[in-house]
Image (tube, helix red, strand yellow):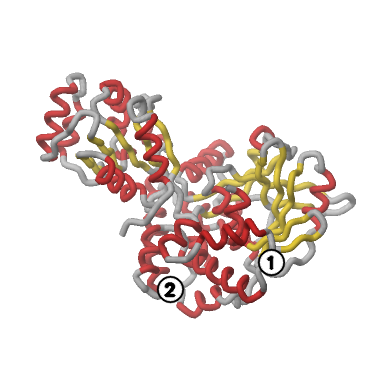
Amino acid sequence: MFFKRKVYDKLLEWKKLYSDRYAVLLEGARRVGKSTIAESFAKNEYKSYILIDFSKTTNKILECFEDIGNLNIFFLRLQAETGTTLYEHDSLIIFDEVQLFPKARQAIKHLVSDGRYSYLETGSLISIKKNVKDILIPSEEMKIQVYPMDYEEFCDATGNSYELLEQIYDSASPIGQATNRKLMRDLRIYMAVGGMPQAVEAYVDGKNFSEIDMVKRQIITLYEEDFKKIDVSGRLSAMYHSIPAQLAKDSKKYRMKSAISKTSSARTEELLYELIDSKTVLPCFNTTDPNVSLADTKDFDSYKLYVSDTGLFVTMMFMDRSVTENDVYAKLLSDNLPANLGYLYENLMAQMIASTGRELYYHTWEKKDSTHYYEVDFLVSDKSKINAFEIKSSGLGKHESINEFCAKYSKNVNKSYLISQKDVGKDGSLFLKPFYLVPFIVK
């Protein structure tokens, strides 16, 4: 099943403006839909295409790359082996899972320079050391990140009206408790299913939540297998699985020692960036001096990790059982789970911000004469200033941190938001918004 994805529009732009000078690389975690998007684009936008899936291609295809010095012979062999005719300036060659055959990625420089055809690569674990060892990374490569389906894409796939949400946002007015509760329940379905296309397809096909949960568990198992290929010790998998528990503790940063046994600081840092490069997690860095240039003040030793897909996060919360039962999902959808789920909604917020292509930042600082600290959950650049966000899973509660932040950094703050399940409102200069309006705030 093919779902409408925003990446498709970016590929159209690439074809129109850049395909004569650059190959395009769709990069992202496994099972986010890269291959499906690539082949659909090729079918719809080109007269012909060749798809080379390096996870299952033949030795004869691989042998074609042994010598690309004579591109005339290379293209003839490729057409003969695939049975596909290539048309100059109207054919696309897809290198699927290109990280498995780095030699093909290195060839991109010469293929693009030749100019006869267009090239699209897909890959996960693209930046992992062993996948770039001994090859020259082509500068003629334009990267496009592919994320799990965002809430707009999910609404489109499931028949919900995203345009209605935009109208609600534009009105900036409360919509009433009944409608707000309905829209929050719709969003919790997205949280439970997530944005992995296989899980969304299972939901659209009418599968129950236990069946959808099994689909997500298979994806997590696939990630675990990838982690073991990178680090056989199992530490990457341990780091990944510790994310929900660490967020639940509400500590001000991710603690490596809580996830894995003691190791050298150099290897610890390497493991962190290998996990980040897998695109299965979203790093959120503490900024030491919040201003419009958040990247300039990130603290590389103080960060949080979120799971790139909140649907997978929900499954990871219940990994102590072989399958998450339907009644657990029913309680989640009705907001009746007997637990404080602030960390789950925090992960949702992280995913919503990251899906716009933004990096994630937060800020902590110590309270005067206290062992406690203030924390603002997320910071987003907005022109020459920043917007600050505090997350509440249920009621509005106290929001001392964001008030103190706005007072301390008043010259840098444009708007401040408290995001919760409650209806639109305002508390002084603090904007109160429900989670389903976040995509319009951060886009």
Count of labels shown?
2
Q: Residues within 10 Å of mark 2 (few under 14, many from 20)?
A: many
Spatial separation of the CA atoms under disc 1 and disc 2: 32 Å
Identify residue for label 2. 209
Q: Is residue 399 above or below residue 136?
A: below
Between 408 and 383, the one lying in front of the other is 383
Residue closest to the far top: 69
- Residue 4 percent coordinates (x, y): 38, 54
The residue at 50%/69% (across/down) is: 189
Proximity of marks 1 and 2: CB atoms separated by less than 8 Å: no
Residue closest to the far right: 369
Q: Amino acid at mark 2?
A: Phe
Q: Amino acid at mark 1?
A: Pro
Q: Which mark is residue 174?
A: 1
Q: Earlier in the sequence, mark 1 or mark 2?
A: 1
Between 424 and 73, the one lying in front of the other is 424
The residue at 28%/22% (across/down) is: 110
Residue 288 appears anywhere in the view:
no
